[in-house]
Image: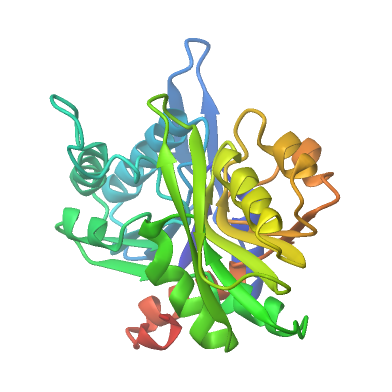
Amino acid sequence: MKIFSGSAHPELAREIAEILGIPVGQAKLRRFPDTEVSFQIEENIRGTDVFVVQPTCPPVDQHIMELLVMIDAFRRSSAARITAVIPYYGYARQDRKDKPRVPISAKLVANILSASGANRVLTMDLHKAQIQGFFDIPVDHLFAAPVIIDHLARQQFRKLTIVSPDAGGAERARAYAKRLDAELAIIDKRRAPEDGHAEVMNVIGEVRGRTCIIQDDILDTGGTMQNAAQALVANGAERVWACAVHGLFSGPAIQRIEEAPIERFIVTNTIPLSPEKASCRKLVPLSVARLLGQAIRSIHEETSVSSLFV
């Protein structure tokens, strides 16, 4: 078994390798002057079970191309099996034709990963679980819920309500509420015509005098989260926390979180945080390295991964 890393998140790869008790594989990843990707494996991997860690986070296209080139190199070097470990799967939100004449980019990325030579994909909290069906190769779909729920359970909140910031996330929020023995609330929102903007309309559920935790899978520009927090406070919430699995923090996201009535914002390290973003006093980063490491060991040893699913 060998762990290799792309340029997207070498810290996570090193943490996973340390948990597994193995070194990160030796390889040289760089770019030519014209920005083309150059990759060379610097050790023998013939017959090896290879795991390449590369979240396809911003710059998304650059990291996807790196991953494809790396997988091709492993295939041509006679690796026994290549597993693409993609903690954050880019383009996952483009998973259907919701407008005329648009692509289904999540399916396109699945196709090119298979075509490059990947034998398996290990990913975490896909935007929609049915994206697994876009692949013609096995997909292990993990959830960060055990990591986040364990942290929340240690806080010993009283009168706790888990809040979904939109109707689409209600099932995910319900799972958190069940594990934490909490109430469930849903925010009804109407999206404005411009992409990335949302207007909160109404809170469905009991939040007055309660501690509310907004739960979402992806935090992008932070507009939805800010509006949701303001709506909860306006409806009498006593305290507001928030959590998200994938922290993209695009554009004004950090500023919006700072300005929002949110005490703490929990986020996992599926996407690396820049020093500037990590300095936000409200952020509480949690690591998913152990969860990914357990899954990698199970895949390598051909044992069940089901115990890691929630």
The quarter of the image holding the N terminus is: bottom left
Query: How far across and how far down the image is residue 246, in percent?
Result: 54, 53
Closer-to-camera residue (107/241): 241
- Residue depicted at 58% across the width and 36% down the height: 221
Q: Vertically, is 236 above or below 258?
A: below
Q: Vertically, is 243 above or below 33?
A: below
Closer-to-camera residue (286/158): 158
The quarter of the image holding the C terminus is: bottom left
Query: How far across and how far down the image is residue 240, in percent?
Result: 72, 62
Closer-to-camera residue (212/169): 212
Tell whether 94 sits left or right of 192.
left
- Residue depicted at 62% across the width and 51% down the height: 231
Query: How far across and how far down the image is residue 25, in percent?
Result: 54, 56
Query: How far across and how far down the image is residue 38, in percent?
Result: 45, 28
Is residue 38 something one can see in this rendering? yes
Q: Quadrant of residue 157?
A: bottom right
Is residue 7 something one can see in this rendering? no
Tell whether 128 sits left or right of 179.
left
